[in-house]
Image (cartoon, grey):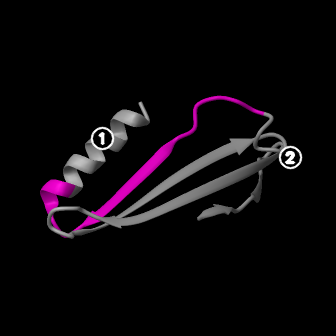
């Protein structure tokens, strides 16, 4: 599921900026123990124009992994962090 939520902020000098937030959510389970795993990835980008495709560059990423088993969640988080480096 992809959620696009543009919001507008103004700076003291009257410059209009756009804040785009993308949220990806994934759910699944492990094969061996059937442990449920929920992963949420947040991408937020502040830009000068209304089109998020116009400006290329680094985007801060926030990854949240929810899992009953701490070891499985930690291993999955480390793998996802390596992907986004």
Give the residue at mark 2.
Answer: 14
- Which residues are drawn in magenta? 55-72
Name the residue nearer the viewer: 26 or 46. 26
Label 2 vs 1, first from the N-terminus: 2
**Image check: 58 left or right of 74?**
right
**Residue 23 placement (x, y as % from top left):** 56, 59
Q: Quadrant of residue 69?
A: bottom left
Q: Residue at x 27, y 49 (%)?
A: 76
Q: Residues within 10 Å of mark 2 (few under 14, many from 20)?
A: few
Q: Is residue 77 magenta?
A: no
- Kindly identify the residue that appears in the image at 23 percent across and 56 percent down: 73
Name the secondary structure under disc 2. Answer: loop
Which quarter of the rendered picture does the N terminus lie within? bottom right
Q: CA distance from mark 2 to mark 1?
A: 42 Å
Relative depth, front residue between 14 and 9:
9
Residue 31 position within the rendered picture, expressed as x and y whole percent measured from the top left: 22, 62
Q: Is residue 17 above or below residue 58?
A: below
Name the element at disc 1: helix
Task: Please tell me whether residue 55 is drawn above or below residue 3 in the rendered image.
Answer: above
Q: Between tags 2 and 1, which lies in front?
A: 1
Residue 47 falls in image quadrant: top right
Q: Tell me the crowding category of disc 1: few under 14, some 14 to 19, or many 20 or more residues within 10 angstroms, Cα based.
A: few
Quarter occupied by the C terminus: top left
Magenta span includes 58: yes
Dots 2, 1 in contact, CB < 8 A: no
- Residue closest to the eye, 62 or 10: 62
Q: Which residue is mark 1?
A: 79
């Amino acid at each position: 599921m992809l959620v696009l939520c543009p919001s507008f902020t103004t700076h003291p000098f009257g410059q209009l900026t756009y804040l785009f937030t993308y949220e990806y959510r994934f759910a699944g389970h492990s094969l061996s123990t059937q442990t449920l795993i929920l992963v949420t990835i947040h991408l937020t980008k502040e830009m000068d124009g209304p089109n998020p495709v116009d400006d290329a560059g680094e985007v801060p990423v926030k990854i949240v992994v929810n899992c009953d088993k701490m070891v499985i969640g930690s291993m999955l988080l480390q793998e996802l962090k390596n992907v986004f480096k």
